[in-house]
Amino acid sequence: MAYSGKVDIQQVIDESPFSGFHWLLIVLGFLVLAIDGFDTAAMGYIAPTLSAEWGIHKQDLGPVLSAALLGLSLGALIAGPVSDRMGRKRVLVFSCLFFGLASLGTAWAQSLNTLTLWRFLTGLGLGAAMPNAITLISEFAPQRCRAMAINTMYCGFPLGAAGGGAISSWLIPHHGWRSVLLTGAIAPLILTVLLALLLPESVKFLVQRGKDVMQVRRIASRFARSTLGSVTGFFLAEEKVASKKGSVGQLFSMPWLPGTLMLWVTYFMGLVIYYVLLSWMPTLMQGMGYALAESAWLTSLFTFGGTAGILLAGWMMDRWEAHKVVAAGFVLTMGLILLLGLEHNHIALFGGLIFLMGIAMNGAQSGMQTLAATFYPTECRATGIAWMQGIGRFGGVAGTMTSAQLLSMQWHADSILMILSVPALVAAAATVYKMLYSRAREPGVA
């Protein structure tokens, strides 16, 4: 049966079969996040070699690691509102071009100060890219499989980080640490061209902004289950509850404010854990007595476990209460962190615990993207996701800087690990509060 008259674009999306069009979007978004993961983990992998070559202590790289996270935060905070005004595709393409060029500068840095500056600029572009990729896929995916679509794409991040370890272990002995950063520069520049040629603009954004019906119809015909030739216009049913405030102001207005704050707290605490592990795990493993090769292998278990966790969380969130899935992931993370701090003498058992923690931690953290995407309406969705990520990245800054300070104070690696159980508990509690608020808030709000 063909659509006719004025049609809710969300209905067209939800009734569409999951097709090659959706897989194209997932693959493109996957590549964006894979490069993000590779670049984020790269400094952790090259840190030992870089420190030895430049004659600096490992903790001296704390500002470099934090500069990238600060750039990620600011990039997200800026890009979210811009995307809600100018479109998801335009911001995503520009951000990939920007962080690709900035990564070239990073590869040729000659001092700690210039390295810190280039990492900050790279972070700006990366911070703008991820929330726009997530927003775009969330606005094209049918509701019945939205969490799985988002999380499948999000697998790019841990796989990119894990791939960074494998690539670094081969590149550094043969071509030096700069070759790792150069690889992270060439990839986004190639991806920029692919995004510009293949990526469509979000139809929900186009409808919300009142764009030409023909433009929306042309894109929607690529995935709609029925013909759209008789459609005279499109609308968004959610507009009836949308605020008249700007995208940023809407986050701080009712009924969005309590949920916004809980999303921020949860994501902040999750990234405290995630970036401490991603940035410092090889160093922490060596502090526990493991060799460099063993440390790299153990770290990769966390990221590979993350892939399984992300897919599992997406599947579960499409079938059960999404908040409960995320909260359970953080509770499991807390328990596994405590076990890691207590048991690290048997490498097989230790590696198994790290793999399980990768499943729980990455599953919970990736689920936050779906919680944010389904919480906000189209007019502020990119801002909502981006600001959650932007504020949350400050958790990464806090975690990496605090870890560097604790290492300089000669804290034992197992003690640093066990401290991470506290933010895991806070994240679980904030998610439960968000769930209770979502049940009680104004009916009809997404």
Image (spheres, helix red, strand yellow):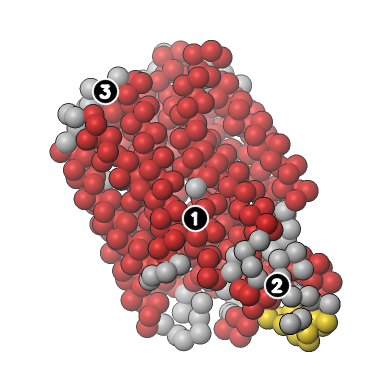
Q: Which of 271/401 is in front?
A: 271
The residue under label 2 is 225
Identify the element where label 1 is drawn.
Answer: helix
The residue under label 3 is 290
**In the displayed structure image, the side of residue 302 where residue 82 appears, left or right:** right
Label 1 and label 2: CA atoms lie apart by 24 Å
Lower position in the chain sequence, tag 1 or tag 3: 1
User: Which residue lies at the image location 44% right of the left edge and 73% below the top edge?
Assistant: 257
> Eyeballing the image, is 25 above or below 249?
above
User: Which residue lies at the image location 17% right of the left edge and 29% below the top edge?
Assistant: 345
The residue under label 1 is 151
Identify the element where label 2 is drawn.
Answer: loop
How packed is label 2: few (under 14 Cα within 10 Å), some, or many (20 or more)?
some
Question: x, y percentage for residue 169?
Answer: 46, 21
Label 1 and label 3: CA atoms lie apart by 33 Å
Question: x, y percentage for residue 248?
Answer: 56, 67
Question: x, y percentage for residue 172?
Answer: 50, 17
Q: Which of 295/275 is in front?
A: 295
Which quadrant would residue 433 be assigned to in this image? bottom left
User: Which residue lies at the image location 59% right of the left edge and 69% below the top edge?
Assistant: 142
Which quadrant would residue 135 be assigned to in this image? bottom right
How packed is label 3: few (under 14 Cα within 10 Å), some, or many (20 or more)?
some
